[in-house]
Image: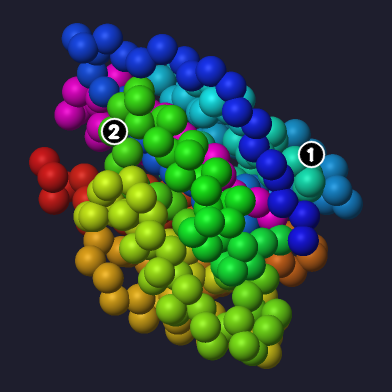
Amino acid sequence: MDAAFFASSSLSPPASPSMPAMRIFVLSGQSNMAGRGGVHRRRWDGVVPPECAPDPQILRLSAGLQWEEAREPLHADIDTAKTCGVGPGMVFARAVLPRLQEQGAAEIGLVPCAAGGTAIREWGRGDHLYDQMVQRARAAAVRGEIEAVLWYQGESDAESAEAAEAYKGNIEKLIKDVRADLGMPELPFIQVALASGDKRNIDKVRNAQLSVNLPNVVTVDAIGLALNEDNMHLSTESQVKLGEMLAEAYITNFLTANC
């Protein structure tokens, strides 16, 4: 399967001690996190809803590990094997920014890591995608504080009954490994239960996602959100809705609890 290889470069300078810390969110998984909203016949239509508009206080970590103003498509230089469009990340960031600013945060930092067409077995500790995600998260943490991982993946695992059966164990191991490797045993992890996938096995993957029993793991259910004509990827309108759902999950379960 095609997967992007992220470049390495020098880091942007860290914030000064007097500057409020950046609040950082890792965006990972496969194509519906990378964003295919507005992508038709391998071309993005370029439509950016107002909920996804750039904001100077929302940055993204580029493939070269440089901070820059975030704008759609967030994964354009990350998921390079496929055409990227609108995903949930910008909507999420714009929705949570005012609440974080109330707590003194100056900026939000998004760390895109998703790669289309990837099964969870490709995200195991020691594999390229996993190691790059952890590397990028550590690089981002130089600038601020990692708040949560947003994870949307599993369509590829619905293609196989064996992979679907193993999904719960694999996702729980991934969460535990990420937390251990980042030294954050209570790191919030917000996953998305599938909206699409092979009808023979999608329910097995969804049941696995919905039955994860680990602390600080919240599942947002994407079932019923409208899809593109490929019946696999969320439309632009659905990505906006998903971003709002993810923001509500973060604010309700983690931000409010920490106030």
Tell me if residue 98 is in the magenta stretch: yes
As measured in the structure, the alpha-carbon distance from the residue carrying label 1 to the one carrying label 2 is 34 Å
Q: Tell me the residue at 68%/84% (across/down).
A: 160
Where, by quadrant of the figure, is residue 80 drawn? Answer: top right
- Vertical relation: 111 (above or below) 29: above
- Vertical relation: 12 (above or below) 24: above
Q: Tell me the residue at 45%/70% (across/down).
A: 171
Image quarter hosting the C terminus: top left
Query: Residue 171 or 19: which is nearer the viewer?
Result: 171
Q: Secondary structure at mark 2?
A: strand
Residue 33 percent across, percent down from the top left? 57, 52
Query: Residue 190 or 163: which is nearer the viewer?
Result: 163
Q: Specify whether residue 10 is in view.
A: yes
What number is the disc on residue 145?
A: 2
Q: Amino acid at mark 1?
A: Asp
Q: Earlier in the sequence, mark 1 or mark 2?
A: 1
Which residue is under mark 1?
45
Q: Specify whether residue 32 is in view.
A: no
Q: Amino acid at mark 2?
A: Glu
Q: Nearer the viewer, mark 1 or mark 2?
A: 2
Residue 6 percent across, percent down from the top left? 64, 37
Residue 103 percent across, percent down from the top left? 17, 29
